[in-house]
Image (cartoon, rainbow, N blue to C red):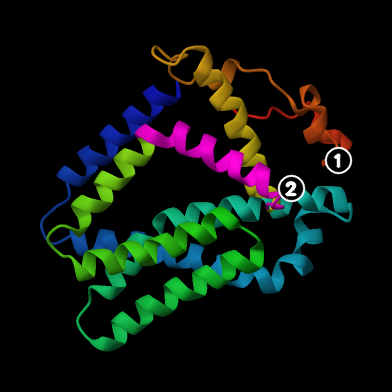
């Protein structure tokens, strides 16, 4: 169903873009970028006001506040995905001031992600800056190299992650919460890959995986009791 919905909305997006009247593209793009800017502003203000406004939306129970902070983390991750578009649009405008503003947006977002504790968004923003520098320094081959590197990572991810998890386990490094949960997810996924390394389990097979943290006592020893019912690999 998710694949069908994605295909449907992608088709609508392309159809809408093809029907954009001449001269209206700038208006449409500015509306989109305006909404992205509002999203970014909310992310930038979150570290300052999140704690004070959380009771307004989630009540006085501290347990409910954790859901609010998780939603902030999701919002930060979502903004990290569109941050390159916003930065590229601002940075491409003529004038040194616009390029300085683009750099400021990227750095401010990076700091906000770090303060919120959104490790994935923070590393994503940092890698975005690196990608911009690579394309700027190597305008002819930079983008090709980036896409080649991404393709190679996708193909080699099980091997790379397996080696990384082994090194982290041997070193005894304490990972942040979001990173640690993803590391455990990868351990389960790697085990599933080893079951059928050639044919795989099929599209969206993880929806059928029922492995919860209760099945891994060593991991549960580091977590609150209510995590026992959570799936290690969210569908």
Front residue of this view, candidates 53 and 127:
127
228 w.r.t. 113: above or below: above
Find residue 35 and report its horizontal and vertical position in percent: 42, 62
Helix, strand or loop at disc 2? helix
Please indicate whether residue 87 sits to the left or right of residue 176 in the image: left
The secondary structure that most of the magenta stretch takes on is helix
Front residue of this view, candidates 191 and 72:
191
Disc 2 packing (10 Å; few <14; some 14–19; many ≥20): few
Q: Where does label 2 land, which residue?
A: 67
Q: Residue at x 77, y 60 (%)?
A: 54
Q: Residue at x 50, y 20 (%)?
A: 193
Distance of mark 2 from mark 1, alpha carbons?
A: 15 Å
Please indicate whether residue 189 sits to the left or right of residue 170 in the image: left
Looking at the rendering, which quadrant does residue 217 occupy? Answer: top right
Q: Residue at x 50, y 75 (%)?
A: 108
The reply to whether the magenta stretch includes residue 15 is no
Please indicate whether residue 20 sits to the left or right of residue 119 in the image: left
> What's drawn in magenta, residue-wise?
155-175
Find residue 64 and report its horizontal and vertical position in percent: 82, 48
Label of residue 60 in the image: none
């Amino acid at each position: 169903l998710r694949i069908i919905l994605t295909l449907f909305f992608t088709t609508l997006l392309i159809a809408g873009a093809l029907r954009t009247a001449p001269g209206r593209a700038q208006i449409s793009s500015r509306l989109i970028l305006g909404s992205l800017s509002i999203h970014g502003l909310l992310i930038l203000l979150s570290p300052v006001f999140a704690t004070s406004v959380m009771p307004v939306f989630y009540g006085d129970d501290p347990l409910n506040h954790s859901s609010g902070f998780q939603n902030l983390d999701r919002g930060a991750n979502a903004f990290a995905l569109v941050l390159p578009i916003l930065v590229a649009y601002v940075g491409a405008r003529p004038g040194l001031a616009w390029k300085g503003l683009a750099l400021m947006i990227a750095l401010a977002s990076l700091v906000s992600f770090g303060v919120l504790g959104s490790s994935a968004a923070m590393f994503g923003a940092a890698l975005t800056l690196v990608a911009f520098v690579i394309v700027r320094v190597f305008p002819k081959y930079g983008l090709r190299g980036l896409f080649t590197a991404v393709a190679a990572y996708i193909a080699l991810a099980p091997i790379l992650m397996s080696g990384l998890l082994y090194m982290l386990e041997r070193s005894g490094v304490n990972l942040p919460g979001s990173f640690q949960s993803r590391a455990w997810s990868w351990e389960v996924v790697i085990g599933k890959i080893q079951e059928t390394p050639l044919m795989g389990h099929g599209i969206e097979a993880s929806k059928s995986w029922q492995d919860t943290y209760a099945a891994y006592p060593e991991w549960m020893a580091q977590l609150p009791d209510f995590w026992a019912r959570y799936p290690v690999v969210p569908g």
